[in-house]
Amino acid sequence: MTDTPKSHGRLSISASLQPRDLMVDRPRLRGAWTARIITLFPEAFPGILGLSLTGRALDQGLWALETIDLRPFGEGKHRNVDDSPAGGGAGMVLRPDVMGAALDQAAIGTPNDRGRWPVVYLSPRGRPFRQDMAHRLAAADGITLICGRFEGLDERVIEEYGVEEVSLGDFVLTGGEIAAQALIDASVRLIPRVLGNQASTEEESFSEGLLEHPQYTRPAVWKGRAVPDILLSGHHAKIATWRRAMAERLTKERRPDLWRAYCERRGRDPDGDAEL
Ligand code: SAH
């Protein structure tokens, strides 16, 4: 094994012992977007990301996944990674020295600029993860993700390493691994060529700050419920108008927060019903 990348046309395969590359037998396009994941459960990856569109893109080298097992950085014979919370209380906290060593490992070969390579701790205290953040992350060179466990991470390591906290929503998971997979999935599908049909990311929910209109397919009538006539009319302009109106109505009903922001951007009155 050597550290020099072997070039196979547009593909480059580089061998390294750590971080563990989940794709040693997969090609990787030069400069492919890479997720480095620090976790106590590397076997949880690629998980669902290894299937379907994200899995195929992984196999094609359009993006790459590397896990860094936190355990070997632990202290002593038992490789302890956690300790009891200062000030008392239930649970355990991940030690800053242990996580710091893993982060040093993760930083090897990545840009220091956090804009080009964000370092993210999945955490319920974080900024809510949204589609615009997925776009920002997908546009970076790659990302390092910290999956927490127990009560979470010592605050000092977050400060010291300029770590950004990102939350999947207002609920508490037992660990960051599922959150990491959700964040990676949402980001990877925005990488060019991953979805195949690029248009579908432009029209889907949130792309204009609206929820998506309802979707229908065959059969035209099912259990007495018909697909709206307009969608079968072949009238593309009318279909587009209908879809927009439905998207606006749904957004207004379900997500007043998104609706207000959408109206503000367009100088529209969020309470005016005239256009719906
Ligand atoms: N004591 C913490 C919760 C720890 S849950 C608190 O109250 O804030 C254990 C780990 O699961 C966290 O460190 C984090 O990595 C992950 N996690 C839990 N909920 C999450 C969420 N909503 N979004 C992202 N990560 C989450």
Image (cartoon, rainbow, N blue to C red):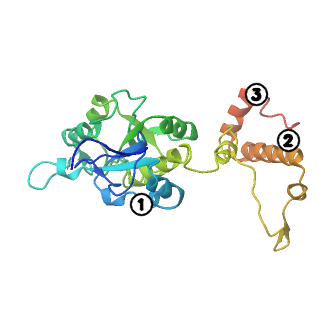
Q: Amino acid at mark 2?
A: Leu
Residue drawn at (64%, 50%), measured in percent from left and top?
197
Tag 3 or tag 2, which sits nearer the N-term?
Answer: 3
Q: Amino acid at mark 1?
A: Gly
Residue drawn at (39%, 33%), measured in percent from left and top?
117
Q: How many other residues sit within 10 Å of disc 3, few (<14), some (14-19) or many (≥20)? A: few
Residue drawn at (69%, 37%), measured in percent from left and top?
208
The residue labelled by disc 1 is: 47
Please say if 176 is above or below 126: below
The span from disc 2 to disc 1 (Cα, nearest Å) is 43 Å
State whether residue 242 appears in this view: yes
Tag 1 or tag 2, which sits nearer the N-term?
Answer: 1
The residue labelled by disc 2 is: 276
Residue farthest along the front direction in this orientation: 9
Residue drawn at (29%, 35%), measured in percent from left and top?
109
Q: Split into 4 quadrants, where in the image is the C terminus? A: top right
Residue 34 percent across, percent down from the top left: 40, 43
Nearest the viewer among 104 and 276 is 104
Residue 53 percent across, percent down from the top left: 54, 56
Q: Is residue 95 left or right of residue 238?
A: left
